[in-house]
């Protein structure tokens, strides 16, 4: 059995997340450490909200980073198996880099808070949007985005599964592309409650600012290698990792290819280290033979995963 760990991005946060785990010392200590570094009570935020504060990108990114690292530390404290590979979806790639040993937690907290702020500022007074297109393949969605972009830019941002593509861009472009997708036979189109169009060219100003932060960071020799969103490949140097993280802001998240790469390397089991099971659902539709464990839903499922992979 060859195991990989994956870490979710924005969208997995919710009021009450990880509440059954806060009696566990590694979880409590991780949240306390992050709260002190950020000068805000992250445990209270994820337990009490308010929801609009939790969902502000500048807060969501360090919150989800902390949640993933806390569960990983709990896993380690229980003697859990060391995975062969890691990956993270969007923001989750940073969580994977911390848990894989490339980056320290404190440095990455500051980095992702800045990333969130730069993303919020990137649009200025323009209105962006994102939408999930269900039931159409990538080739069809690419064509729809090209057609819609003749009047307002839109781009395939997250290649989540063979039949789930998230598009991103100016509000009017996303709205038009969603209508074209319906006409083309999409099962559903879901406008997402966001104003920041992630993983498209509109994030270029954010990438330019993030470059200065990344330049000052030294990456450690990893304990577990991370598969990158940009190209579903591994990186061997700090410069490669920095380039992939910058391009990740403006290019599509290649989640389908990332899971297929893992399977090609012999991965048979994937553990989702986060507060929901969003990635587990996607992974099932990419490779149906995978054994999947969502780690952060409740302590009983955590225990089941620990025992199954011991």
Image (spheres, rainbow, N blue to C red):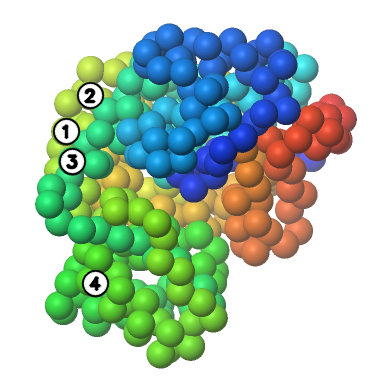
Q: CA distance from mark 2 to mark 4?
A: 31 Å
Q: Are marks 4 and 1 in contact (CB under 8 Å)?
A: no
User: As displayed, is residue 103 above or below residue 139?
Assistant: above
Q: Are marks 1 and 3 in contact (CB under 8 Å)?
A: no
Task: Choose mark 4 or mark 1, whichever is in front.
Answer: 4
Q: Is residue 219 visible?
A: no
Q: Which residue is mark 1?
A: 209
Q: Which residue is mark 2?
A: 213
Secondary structure type for disc 2: helix
Q: Is residue 156 visible?
A: yes
Give the image location of residue 26, x and y in percent: 65, 13
Q: Quadrant of the N terminus?
A: top right
Task: Choose mark 2 or mark 4, whichever is in front.
Answer: 4
Q: Are marks 1 and 2 in contact (CB under 8 Å)?
A: yes
User: As displayed, is residue 269 above or below residue 31?
Assistant: below
User: As displayed, is residue 36 above or below residue 177?
Assistant: above
Q: Residue at x 65, y 64 (%)?
A: 285
Q: CA distance from mark 1 to mark 3?
A: 10 Å
Q: Nearer the viewer, residue 74 or 44?
A: 44
Give the image location of residue 295, x and y in percent: 71, 36
- Few, some or many residues within 10 Å of mark 1 (<14, 14–19, 20+): some
Q: Which residue is mark 3?
A: 121
Q: Residue at x 24, y 72 (%)?
A: 173
Q: CA distance from mark 1 to mark 2?
A: 7 Å
Q: Which residue is mark 4?
A: 173
Left or right of 81, for residue 151:
left
Quadrant hosting residue 104: top left
Secondary structure type for disc 3: helix
Secondary structure type for disc 1: helix
Q: Residue at x 67, y 20 (%)?
A: 22
């Amino acid at each position: 059995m060859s195991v990989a760990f994956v870490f979710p991005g924005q969208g997995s946060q919710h009021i009450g997340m990880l509440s059954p785990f806060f009696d566990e010392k590694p979880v409590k200590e991780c949240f306390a450490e992050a709260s002190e570094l950020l000068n805000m009570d992250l445990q209270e935020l994820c337990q009490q909200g308010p929801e609009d504060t939790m969902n502000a990108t500048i807060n969501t990114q360090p919150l989800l980073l902390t949640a993933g690292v806390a569960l990983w530390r709990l896993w380690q404290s229980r003697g859990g198996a060391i995975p062969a590979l890691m990956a993270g979806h969007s923001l989750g790639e940073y969580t994977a880099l911390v848990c894989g040993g490339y980056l320290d937690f404190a440095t990455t907290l500051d980095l992702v808070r800045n990333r969130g702020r730069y993303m919020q500022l990137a649009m200025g007074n323009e209105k962006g949007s994102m939408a999930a297109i269900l039931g159409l393949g990538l080739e069809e969605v690419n064509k729809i985005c090209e057609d819609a972009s003749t009047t307002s830019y839109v781009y395939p941002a997250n290649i989540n599964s063979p039949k789930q593509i998230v598009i991103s861009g100016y509000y009017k472009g996303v709205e038009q592309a969603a209508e074209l997708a319906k006409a083309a036979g999409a099962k559903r189109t879901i406008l997402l409650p966001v104003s920041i169009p992630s993983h498209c060219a509109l994030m270029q100003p954010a990438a330019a600012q993030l470059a200065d932060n990344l330049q000052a960071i030294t990456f450690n020799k990893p304990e577990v290698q991370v598969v990158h969103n940009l190209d579903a490949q591994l990186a061997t140097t700090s410069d490669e990792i920095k380039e992939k993280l910058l391009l990740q802001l403006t290019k599509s998240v290649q989640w389908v290819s990332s899971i297929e790469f893992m399977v090609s390397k012999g991965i048979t089991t994937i553990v989702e280290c986060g507060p929901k099971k969003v990635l587990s659902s996607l992974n099932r539709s990419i490779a149906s033979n995978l054994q999947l464990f969502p780690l952060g839903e409740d302590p009983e499922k955590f225990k089941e995963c620990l025992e199954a992979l011991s």
